[in-house]
């Protein structure tokens, strides 16, 4: 993979895909775009972005530093969008577990559109 390609897997360059969201030049127009940009933010360890795109009601549990730490602690490999609706995105995020090899996080996330921006609210995990 071209290292300049966006980690979210669109095939676009990072600078033409999720980077403008991370730099706050653009805001994600759909829940799926926000989801992709949050995955990329995990890959590039952009804790601020993860914090700011989490819905206000859910931010209390984690600080920006917590997001930064959790993003840095995981080697993310690949994102697969299973299905995307207006305010729900089901995805599989593959990551490397040092002990067990490749593992997958399978989640259906809920998003909320508020003040002209999309926010991540919470998710339901699949075993
Ligand atoms: Zn992207």
Image: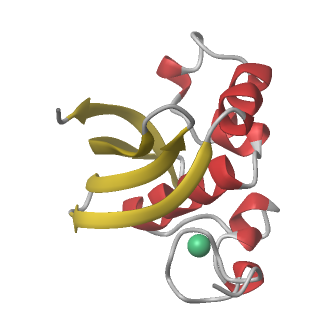
Which x, y percent locates residue 68? 76, 32
Q: What residue is rendered at 58% in x and 20% in y? A: 59
The spot of residue 125 in percent (x, y) is 24, 32
Colour scheme in use: secondary structure
Q: Quadrant of the C terminus?
A: top left
| 70 to the left or right of 116 | right
Residue at left 25%, top 61%? 86
Q: Tell me the quarter of the picture where residue 65 sits.
A: top right
Q: Quadrant of residue 84?
A: bottom left
Q: Position of residue 16 (x, y in %)?
A: 70, 86
Position of 99 relative to 31 (above/below)? above
- How many labels, in total? 0
Q: Is 122 left or right of 59, judged from the image as shown?
A: left
Ligand 1 - quadrant of the structure image: bottom right
111 above or below 15?
above
Residue 53: image quadrant is top right
Question: Which part of the image, by quadrant, shows the N terminus?
Answer: bottom right
| Name of the residue lying farthest toward the front | 99
Q: Nearer the viewer, residue 61 or 55?
A: 61
Indicate the position of residue 51 as horizontal and vertical percent values. 67, 33
Relative vertical location of residue 110 with respect to residue 67 in this rendering, above or below = below
Left or right of residue 61: residue 94? left
Q: Residue at x 58, y 61 (%)?
A: 37
Q: Is residue 127 above or below residue 120?
A: above
Q: Nearer the viewer, residue 13 or 2?
A: 2
Seen from the viewer's position, the closer of residues 65 and 25 is 65
């Amino acid at each position: 993979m071209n290292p300049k390609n966006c980690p979210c897997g669109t095939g676009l360059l990072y600078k033409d895909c999720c980077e403008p969201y991370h730099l706050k030049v653009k805001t994600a127009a759909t829940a799926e775009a926000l989801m992709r940009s949050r995955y990329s933010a995990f890959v590039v360890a952009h804790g601020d972005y993860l914090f700011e795109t989490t819905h206000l009601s859910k931010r209390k549990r984690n600080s920006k530093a917590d997001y930064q730490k959790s993003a840095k602690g995981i080697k993310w490999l690949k994102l697969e969008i299973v299905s995307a609706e207006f305010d729900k995105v089901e995805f599989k995020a593959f990551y490397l577990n040092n002990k067990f090899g490749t593992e997958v996080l399978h989640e259906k996330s809920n998003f909320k559109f508020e003040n002209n921006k999309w926010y991540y609210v919470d998710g339901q995990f699949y075993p």
